[in-house]
Image: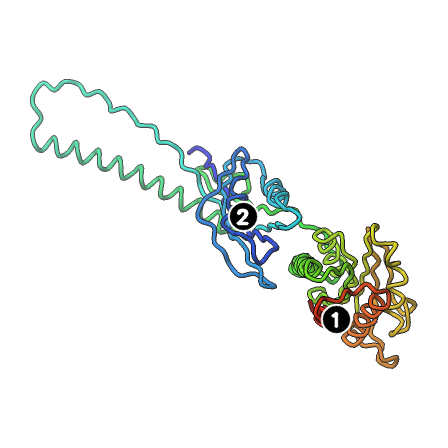
Amino acid sequence: MPEKQFKRIITWDVIAADADADFDACTKMVQAIAMEGLKWIGVPAIEPHVFGLSKMVMACEITVEEDLSEPIQEAIEALSTEDLDFSATIANIDFVEMETPKVQKPEPASEPASEPASDLDSLKAELEVVKAKNAEQDQEIAALKEAVQALQAGGGKKAGKKGGDAPQERREKAPQEALPEGMDKKMAAKCDQDGTAKAKELKKMTAEYGNLFYACAVNAPEGNLPGLERATVSANKTAPELGKLFASDGTENLAVTVTVPAELAEKVNAKEWLAAALECVGGVAVASEVNERDGFTSLSIAQDGPAGRFPIKMKDDIIAAGFQFLREKGLVADADDDEEPDMNMLGEC
């Protein structure tokens, strides 16, 4: 029996980090990705995700031996723009046997009968033909059952006539990103999305009030410093023109990042802003970890009950102090008609 060929059906979770995204246009963009051996199948489904976002559940068919999962993921994420950030993860992979065309067997030439066949002979001949077809179908059914059992057992061995080993079929997944300690894939995705969403909200406030600096909370990292750093990177990618002081509290730690774009450095010195914001909790010296990242500074402050340092309280105090620093420098614009932007909302914007 010839070795069976299998195709892979990959189900993707595709996230466009914009609650107002045109999902019909987004799915068309993804399904326009073309590669040899790749075919998009089925109708995409839109399902709720996190932070008011939705995800597109899409499926594709891979008919080549090459693992296309990583190139496909990279192609989807390359669709990202300044206003729309795409991410993709594999939700499931199935293996399905590929149909092979059946070769029509020529009917054997019958020798001319010396005498016309009787009705009984004709029925016997038809019976033999039916038996032959049923035997062929039984073989195909047995082969399919064999393949199913092999896949259910983990794709190890596929039984053949001689019981030999067949190439192992296994579920293939894209290489997993190495994540820092204390962060899993789900948290990393939430941090990326929260940072992007936060930056978009700040850009809207800038368009309305004209402010270029903000001090606010980012909830998803829950005090995890690498998580807040991820959120900050995403926010800086979406709104690189804005200065941002982010704070995130957890049960044991408070994480803080400060970003000042180079073109705004004459207005605000990042170290002075950070020092002023942290003065209320004892200054930068109380930080257990301080990092200089690409374009921003990050630090972590551990909870210290005897000293009165609790993450949730420190977060509120630091945001308020960071905002007061901006106000004293005249960097908080007042609106017309004696109306002022509600800066209190920036703590949870």
Amino acid type, label 2: Cys
Q: Nearer the viewer, residue 117 or 37?
A: 37
Residue 303 is left or right of residue 82, and the answer is right
Which residue does the numbered mark 2 point to in the structure image?
26
Displayed quadrant of residue 122: top left
| Residue 134 horizontal/vertical position (percent) | 27, 39
Compute the Cα span from label 1 to label 2: 35 Å
Please report the residue visible at 58 percent of the width from the left and 63 percent of the height from the top. 52
Secondary structure under the numbered disc 2 in the rendered image: helix
Disc sitting over residue 119 in the figure: none
Q: Tell how many labels.
A: 2
Which residue does the numbered mark 1 point to in the structure image?
250
Q: Nearer the viewer, residue 294 or 270?
A: 270
| Residue extending furthest toward the right | 285
Above or below for 304 versus 224:
below
Please report the residue visible at 7 percent of the width from the left and 32 percent of the height from the top. 119
Quadrant of the image for the C terminus?
Answer: bottom right
Amino acid type, label 1: Gly
Please report the residue visible at 56 percent of the width from the left and 45 percent of the height from the top. 170
Mark 1 and mark 2 lie on one chain; the one further toward the N terminus is: 2
Question: Is residue 172 among the parts visible in the rendering?
Answer: yes
Residue 233 is left or right of residue 165, and the answer is right
Question: Is residue 188 among the parts visible in the rendering?
Answer: no
| Residue 79 horizontal/vertical position (percent) | 61, 44
| Residue 192 horizontal/vertical position (percent) | 68, 56
Residue 73 is left or right of residue 259, and the answer is left
Above or below for 331 versus 17:
below
Displayed quadrant of residue 185: bottom right
Front of the two marks 1 and 2: 2
Residue 192 is left or right of residue 126, and the answer is right
Above or below for 91 versus 127:
below
Quadrant of the image for the N terminus?
Answer: top left
